[in-house]
Image: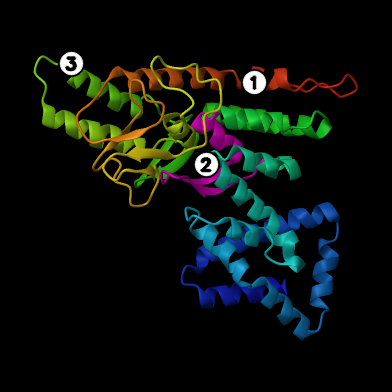
Amino acid sequence: MILLLFLVKILFISYPHSFYIVEFWFQIGIHAILASNSEKNMENKINSFDESPQEIKNESVHDLLTPDALNLVDFHLNPSQRLSTADWVNLSMVSNKHQTLFKPLADVYKLLHYVVRSQYDEVKELLKNDINLMLKRERVVDCSGREFQSISGFEYALWALDKHMWTMMLESIPKDEEGKKVLAELLFQYDKVCTDGVTYNLDGKTITENHFDFQGTIIKELQIQWDSLNLPEVDWEASKKQWIEGVGGVQRKLPMHVVYEYCSRDFHWNPPPPFTSRPQSSTKFYNHETRKDEDWFAKDSKLGIDFMINKGENQFGASASFGVYGGHTGLDAMKALYAIRTNEFSKFKSQAEAYLEYDDQLAPLQFA
């Protein structure tokens, strides 16, 4: 406890936003208590620390205030920042002496970082070591700037309608008693998303919804464009503005797996594909003006300002569109993707039950 009080004092002095720092360290403490309870040695550790000489206590405080530890604090306060692979390694190995405190929380952040980016292989590797990571809630900001104050990786996959992510999570569950407990929690979280929805902040607004609003965003803007070009008299300036700012603006807000569908070169959208296979994990589109591939979520991107991104009638990849356009291909594809994913969302329970077939010796699992 001396360590905690001393640490709080240092943080109040060192950081102007000390309330949030204390909140972070409180969460670290909760993780430490949970981890230590499982080992049944927290009390011994505290007693041992309180009985240690002052120089050892000071050394322990110094160990906790390493650059990597403060890096984890900074990431908690600014979860939207992009971290390199090396940064993630450092966060996972903050201190050999204090991995019990830091690693569990770092792993949750790491998993959420990968989930919102639809990095399936990286999520799968993390779940091999700790299947419960996908159930743990923390704060995360996705690539479109949505801030979720408390959400699990699984809940985000449901909200985003990322069928490939939730299926991979489901297939990672061991078919044993531990797996049954994980599945029960998944079903609890699924019911919660269905009934209460997911809440996030975006552009100064607080939004609660069961899943990403295809209908009110990308489908709406593409439909407006299609309708405007089929009027008896077309307002070409208004249509260009709608194409670039209306459609392009909402494209900046698409979940990552939808961006993958746009950018994948595996198939075109005319006619709409069945959207059963996982697309290429690419966020690259071709810009004819710069004559190079660019990233969908680049900080200096002019998407929604100078151009929108189109997946044309016959082309396989995505490209920037600066002029007036508005064929039915993109609209039909987004309608099809939305219908398919919402149908799969509604059938998650049956998907879970079908996947996890337990041995006869395991007690039956009650599904809500």
Image position of 68 (left or right of 231) = right
Q: In terms of sequence position, does the residue under pointer 3 or pointer 2 come before the other?
A: 2
| Residue, disc 2 | 116
Q: Give the spatial CA distance, label 3 vs label 2.
A: 37 Å
Q: Residue at x 12, y 32 (%)?
A: 237
Q: Amino acid at mark 2?
A: Val
Residue 330 position, x and y percent, is 34, 23
For the residues bearing labels 3 and 1, Cβ distance under 8 angstroms: no
Image quadrant in which you'd find residue 336: top left
| Residue, disc 1 | 349
Q: In terms of sequence position, does the residue under pointer 2 or pointer 1 come before the other?
A: 2
Q: Amino acid at mark 1?
A: Lys
Visual colour scheme: rainbow
Image position of 352 (left or right of 56) = left
| Residue, disc 3 | 230
Q: Residue at x 69, y 33 (%)?
A: 185
Q: Residue at x 64, y 58 (%)?
A: 89
- Disc 1, SS: helix
Q: Nearer the viewer, residue 245 or 159?
A: 245
